[in-house]
Image (spheres, rainbow, N blue to C red):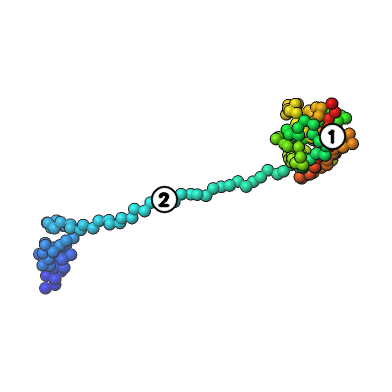
Amino acid sequence: MRTTLLSLLFLVACGDTTATGDSAAADSGTTTAGDTDADTDTDTDTDTDTDTDTDTDTDTDTDTDTEPVTTATLTGTIHRTVDPVNGGTGSIYVALFDKDPVWEADTATVIGQVLVEDVDMRGAQTATYTMTGLQPSAQAYFVFAFLDDNGTASEAEPIPDAGDLVTMDFLTAPTVKVDRIAEFTKDLDLNMVMPF
């Protein structure tokens, strides 16, 4: 009896279908020797996730670093107190010198200059100028401006001639202090006519 029970357990453990009454038709698992069942497991991947990453990087790296300012700026308004003799329209030349360009023209050095074009000084009109990139100095600079309304001056030779309106301050060029890194203002008056 004990031998028969052990034999049955052994046969069941070995998968003998004749010993357990298991029919071949009911087995849908893996096959063993002599088993003719086919694996009918048809499980397939039904995952249909087709998402794609369409995000674009719109970040822009903006460099906000700025170079330190090391120069000064001179601005001002130009008006006239004498009447023009050449029509009153043209260009105004403004220059900054380290020495008086009236009495020391041979040794005066230009520190900065600007050309204001298409100016109409026939009536009460005014013009404005801005000169940048100036090196500060403890010594006062001389500023000189003239209206070229006869068209004889040029940027290569910015020299006034007879009839041009010029800025004078008791027969010298006006002075201005530009002694630190800042913006300075100097209004100019075309108050004299160059003699003929």
x, y percentage for residue 74? 77, 41
The residue under the point 76% across, 45% down is 183
Between marks 2 and 1, how big is the CA–CA gap?
72 Å
x, y percentage for residue 144? 81, 35
Amino acid identity at mark 1? Met
Q: Which mark is residue 34?
A: none
Mark 2 burial class by Cα count in 10 Å: few <14, some 14-19, many 20+? few
Is residue 4 shown above or below 108?
A: below
The residue under the point 89% across, 36% down is 170
Name, please, the residue furthest toward the right. 170
Query: 150 or 64, which lies in front?
Result: 150
Query: 81 or 70, which lies in front?
Result: 81
Q: Does residue 64 appear anywhere in the picture?
A: yes
Query: 45 or 15, which lies in front?
Result: 45
Q: Which mark is residue 54?
A: 2
Which of pointers 2 and 1 indicates the residue nearer the eye?
1
Identify residue for label 1.
192
Element assignment for label 2? loop
Amino acid identity at mark 2? Thr
Is residue 18 shown above or below 106?
A: below
Element assignment for label 1? strand
The residue under the point 13% across, 58% down is 37
Q: Quadrant of the C terminus?
A: top right
x, y percentage for residue 82? 83, 37
Q: Is residue 4 left or right of residue 61?
A: left
